Amino acid sequence: IAGITQAPTSQILAAGRRMTLRCTQDMRHNAMYWYRQDLGLGLRLIHYSNTAGTTGKGEVPDGYSVSRANTDDFPLTLASAVPSQTSVYFCASSDSLGGAGYTFGSGTRLTVV
Amino acid sequence: GENVEQHPSTLSVQEGDSAVIKCTYSDSASNYFPWYKQELGKGPQLIIDIRSNVGEKKDQRIAVTLNKTAKHFSLHITETQPEDSAVYFCAASDANDYKLSFGAGTTVTVRA
């Protein structure tokens, strides 16, 4: 079934540790995104990539990095996790300018202790 | 950049009644306005969208209205059912960007 796969589905992480959240899509979408979802704050964009080889900063990029080596994969790395990064993380992709065709993954619930 | 505000943050309705969620946006260049439904433990899914050349769009029990002059758009759910209980997000984008800007979400609870 075409879509977005995120891994892991959940993780408890000690503060200061490094963590990479994985995201893979099989729809050949050009653009990919990482959002974090916190109660009362909605979906906030962390980083995005409009096409393979390019990335950009979103609304809340500090403490996170991304890479886009190919069309399908868009990993999100927390270099040194802090408790404020406890959140649910969603990866998404789209293939059209103008915002249409967004598809979301099922999310990764991350708890930093 | 675009700023999307969404109200109310929570909404409780009796089964069979209507639910209305309202959003405003700041960027007059925005021309695409989708609505997403997020069920517990899942990612958001598109339920309906509207473009700026249309004032209203319906799909069975859901409808969206757009007022470009006032820069606001609304989601209407009629004859609500328990399965309509979820978090709903509005969003906006312009033709030159891939990205969507999201509202903060509305938690809808349909009481049986």
Image (tube, rainbow, N blue to C red):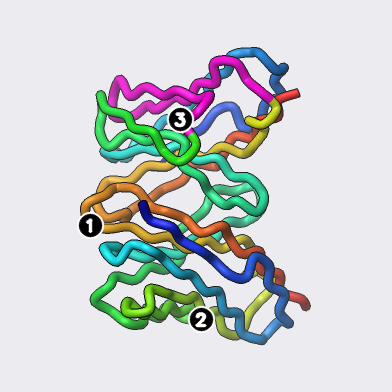
Q: Position of residue A67 (x, y in %)?
A: 37, 22
Q: Start and end of the magenta stretch?
A: A61-82
Subunit of mark 3? A
- Check residue A23 in the rendering and tell me which mark sits there, or answer none: 3
Q: Position of residue B60 (x, y in %)?
A: 46, 81
- Asked if residue A31 is positioned above or below residue B81 in the image, the reply reads above
Subunit of mark 1? B
Asked whether residue B31 appears in the rendered view, the answer is: no
- Check residue B95 in the rendering and tell me which mark sits there, or answer none: 1
- Tell me the distance, in whole angstroms, between the alpha carbons under discs 1 and 2: 28 Å
- Tell me the distance, in whole angstroms, between the alpha carbons under discs 3 and 1: 26 Å
- Asked if residue B104 is positioned above or below residue B79 in the image, the reply reads above
- Determine the secondary structure under disc 3: strand
Q: Position of residue B92 (x, y in %)?
A: 38, 60
- Check residue A47 in the rendering and tell me which mark sits there, or answer none: none
- Asked if residue B56 is positioned above or below residue A47 in the image, the reply reads below
Q: Does label 1 or label 2 sit earlier along the sequence?
A: 2
B108 lies left or right of A45? right
Q: Position of residue A83 (x, y in %)?
A: 70, 27
Q: Label 3: how many residues lie within 10 Å, few (<14), some (14-19) or many (20+)?
A: many
Subunit of mark 2? B
B36 lies left or right of A88? left
- Determine the secondary structure under disc 2: loop
Asked whether residue A90 appears in the rendered view, the answer is: yes
Q: Are marks 3 and 1 in contact (CB under 8 Å)?
A: no
Q: Nearer the viewer, mark 1 or mark 2?
A: 1
- The residue pinned by badge 2 equals B61
* Magenta residues, dominant SS class: loop
Locate the N terminus of chain A by quadrant: top left
Q: Amino acid at mark 1?
A: Ala
